[in-house]
Amino acid sequence: MTFSVAVAGASGYAGGELLRILAGHPELEVRTVTAHQNAGHPLIAHQPHLRSLAHLTLQDTSAETLSGHDVVFLALPHGTSGEIASQLPADTIVVDCGADHRLEDPADWAAFYGGEHFGAWAYGVPELPIAGTTGGKQRDHLVGARRIAAPGCNASAVSLALAPGIQAGLIDDEDIVAVLAVGPSGAGKSLKTMYLASEILGSANPYAVGGTHRHIPEIQQNLRKAGAGSPTVSFTPVLVPMSRGILATSTARVKPGVTAEQVQAAWEDAYAGEPFVHVLPAGVLPRTSDVLGANTVLIGVALDAAAGRVVTVLAIDNLYKGTAGAAIQSVNIALGLDETAGLTVNGVAP
């Protein structure tokens, strides 16, 4: 059976990555693409790498245009998808690739985003461990879902990196530190000085420092679901000169007596059998180049015995697994399809 798909925000980076993956999906067919200021343009004018979709023209982003499809992906700036989504039929699967439906607490939304809080949807990180159930994962909440919130790429990286230690009771949640090297594509196609090549090339540029990044409450929410009480997270992203990718180094204090063997086993057990989340052997650490163009998450974990901290290093492609791949993986689950349909674990090299 073929399911019809519309993608809003199709001229942007996230929209383009959705379309690139969907173009090879065996059961999802892209029939409509929309944009705002680029409406009326051929899709190929803004996504010249998507040759198989050259027949599509960008239409205006409206509920009327998006209605009538089985699945609608909203790759729109925060604060804009909530209103459109509220006008779409209840039986349509709607996936918000923005932030409007990730946070459960209206106070978190008010503090980090502002404006109307549109309510939380089923969270689109299937592999996220959930406390209180044997082997329970977030995917259980995606089965049959008709409203799905795709994750923040940085938030899913830190959450997947640390949730196994929280769930296993090996680490404290009061002193979590995460520093991420990130590519600028995560910020979209916005024309801002800090994203210009002349500013990024040959430099590393921290931003949203001092607890101001909008993914912090999302990380805390995810860790609470894994079993944390009131996690404190010091989160610092750093722009680096690679177009896409995240290398997240996250650390936390370990409980007394925890061994390196226990740490390695906890992470391996948490993701055993997962098609896309792979824990590397002890002593092996990932590189962003190994996950480029793939729905793969690679995690290396170590115990810093002298500091009494666990150190995790996680690599993902921010546009693929960080956004578009997670969204499509979640839709596969919601529709009862093979979870891996249309998605790849194989990266691009060199």
Image: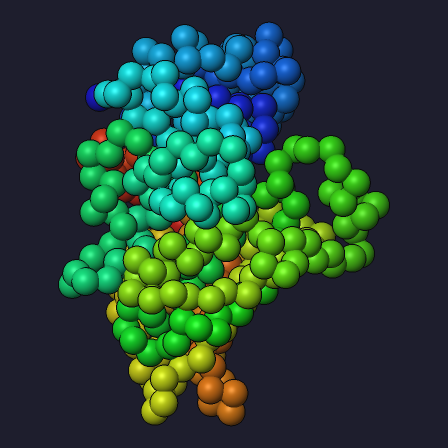
Residue 41 at x, y percent in the picture: 62, 11
The residue at 36%/44% (across/down) is 104
Quarter of the view holding residue 332: top left
- Relative to 70, 207 lies left or right: right
Residue 151 vs residue 132, the one in the foreground: 132
The residue at 47%/66% (across/down) is 232
- Relative to 161, 50 lies left or right: right
Q: How many marks?
A: 0
Residue 177 at x, y percent in the picture: 53, 69
The residue at 34%/91% (across/down) is 257
Residue 136 visible within the image = yes
Which quadrant, please, contains the N terminus? top left
Residue 26 vs residue 302, the one in the foreground: 302
Residue 134 in the image: above or below residue 142: below
Q: Residue furthest right?
A: 198
Residue 195 in the image: above or below residue 282: above
Residue 97 at x, y percent in the picture: 45, 35
The residue at 74%/43% (across/down) is 195
Residue 281 at x, y percent in the picture: 40, 74
Residue 255 in the image: above or below residue 190: below
Residue 39 in the image: above or below residue 197: above
- Relative to 98, 205 lies left or right: right
Q: Residue furthest left?
A: 134
Residue 317 visible within the image = no
- Relative to 204, 55 lies left or right: left
Q: How is the image coloured?
A: rainbow
